[in-house]
Amino acid sequence: MTRMHQTLISLKTMVVVVGIVAGTGGAAMADNYGAIAFSKSTGGFGFAYDHLSRRDAENRAMAECRARTRGCEIAIWFKNACGSVAMGSNGWGSAWAESRRAAERAAIRNCSRHTRGCTTLAWTCTSM
């Protein structure tokens, strides 16, 4: 084997190894879903985080909410983020963002478009 041929084989091997390593890096980073369910009439809520699908997260949040109160609905779902729900005197708002603080601020801002006295009712974050 010539030196040039050996170098080409080494380069091809490195490309394959780099491709395998790069391909597995993405697979290790799974999406995490979360959701918050709540009752407008009672203010009761349930939440879920780090589920493999939106459906699973929403089902868990609804189950937790229904175990505590009646009239539950999904207020927000999110992926690789934080979610928050805020309630005021005559309305509510929800939001998601990259941090708890940003999600809470956005939910309060959304709530304030409909009513007064908005405060955070619930929040949760995925592992991201």
Image (cartoon, helix red, strand yellow):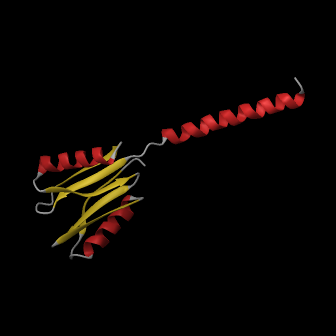
Q: Nearer the viewer, residue 26 or 39?
A: 26
Residue 71 shown left or right of residue 22 in the figure? left
Q: Which residue corresponds to the image point at 35% horizontal and 62% vertical from the top-left?
A: 103
Up/down of 41 relative to 49, above or below: below
Q: In the figure, residue 10 lies in which quadrant?
A: top right
Up/down of 36 relative to 3, above or below: below
**Image quadrant where one finds the N terminus:** top right
Give the percent coordinates (x, y) of residue 97. 39, 61
Q: Nearer the viewer, residue 65 or 104?
A: 65
| Residue at the top extreme, as displayed | 1
Up/down of 58 relative to 108, above or below: above
Q: Which residue corresponds to the image point at 66% horizontal and 33% vertical from the top-left?
A: 17
Give the percent coordinates (x, y) of residue 116. 21, 76
Give the percent coordinates (x, y) of residue 69. 11, 52
Q: Nearer the viewer, residue 56 or 110?
A: 56
Up/down of 115 relative to 78, above or below: below
Q: Which residue corresponds to the image point at 87% horizontal and 31% vertical from the top-left?
A: 4
Residue 84 shown left or right of residue 102 in the figure? left
Give the percent coordinates (x, y) of residue 54. 32, 48
